[in-house]
Image: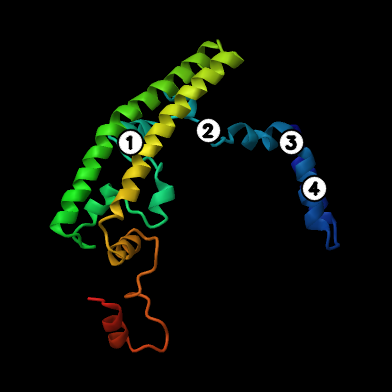
Amino acid sequence: MGFCLCLRAARGLYFNMENALKVKTLLLALLVCMPFSTLAQHNHTAQTPYAGMQNRAIKSLSDNDINELRRGGGWGLALAAELNGMPGPSHLLELKDQIPLTPDQVDKTQMLLDEMRKAAIPAGERFIAAEKALEAAFASGKVDEASLRRLLADTESARSELRFIHLSQHYKTVQFLTPEQIKRYNILRGYADDPCKNIPAGHNPEMYKRHMGCN
């Protein structure tokens, strides 16, 4: 009721004022009359980036993270190699026809991928278990400096081993790939511009494509 009366008063003030400030005055009057709870309403419903993560079984890992680790996926651990011209075996096989890879290169790449997954899957399970133990310690409230350092050492050891497994397979691929194949891989993965699609101004398109070896 009080807000309605205040609103009527504000309307009266708006119609009675004849100077250029009447709109600002109206807005100020409404702001003063508005209950604080209304102003704060949006703050109560605002969400942080972590909202919803409290429902995870392991707070630091999503279901997608766990699935990726359990299938031996890269999980972004090999970006130092991937983004510096050292292709990963999994993506190489996905693009084998577009690069293209020779049958011998396909066999070598498949061998690297099989080796990587054979080592990465159990290493991923160790990492998940270490994160689960860390989660359990904080959930129980039984954490001290010594136990925390031990738990973190376990998680970082597992993560380091997992990262080594993935990175090591990346640098091995360049031993049997040509520079042209690596360049093609980077274009297909979106890390470099395709010269066949970005013809510099002033060049004859047909001559330029022929010179660049475009199909």
Instruction: Measure the alpha-carbon separation of dots 3 and 4.
Output: 14 Å
Instruction: Measure the alpha-carbon separation of dots 2 and 4.
Output: 36 Å
Res 170 visible: yes
In the image, what residue type sits under mark 2?
A: Tyr
User: Picture coordinates of residue 61 (x, y %)?
Assistant: 43, 30
Lower position in the chain sequence, tag 2 or tag 4:
4
Q: Residues within 10 Å of mark 2 (few under 14, many from 20)?
A: few
Q: Residues within 10 Å of mark 4 (few under 14, many from 20)?
A: few
Lower position in the chain sequence, tag 3 or tag 2:
3
Depth check: give the residue in front, 48 or 16. Answer: 48
Residue designated by label 4: 28
Lower position in the chain sequence, tag 2 or tag 1:
2
For the point 31% across and 34% down, which residue is it? 120
Residue 50, numbered circle: 2
Q: Nearer the viewer, mark 3 or mark 2?
A: 2
Q: Nearer the viewer, mark 3 or mark 4?
A: 4
Residue designated by label 1: 68
Asked if labels 1 and 3 touch by Cβ distance under 8 angstroms, the answer is: no
User: Picture coordinates of residue 2 (x, y %)?
Assistant: 76, 33
For the N terminus, which image quadrant? Answer: top right
Up-down relation of residue 112 to residue 64 (above or below): below
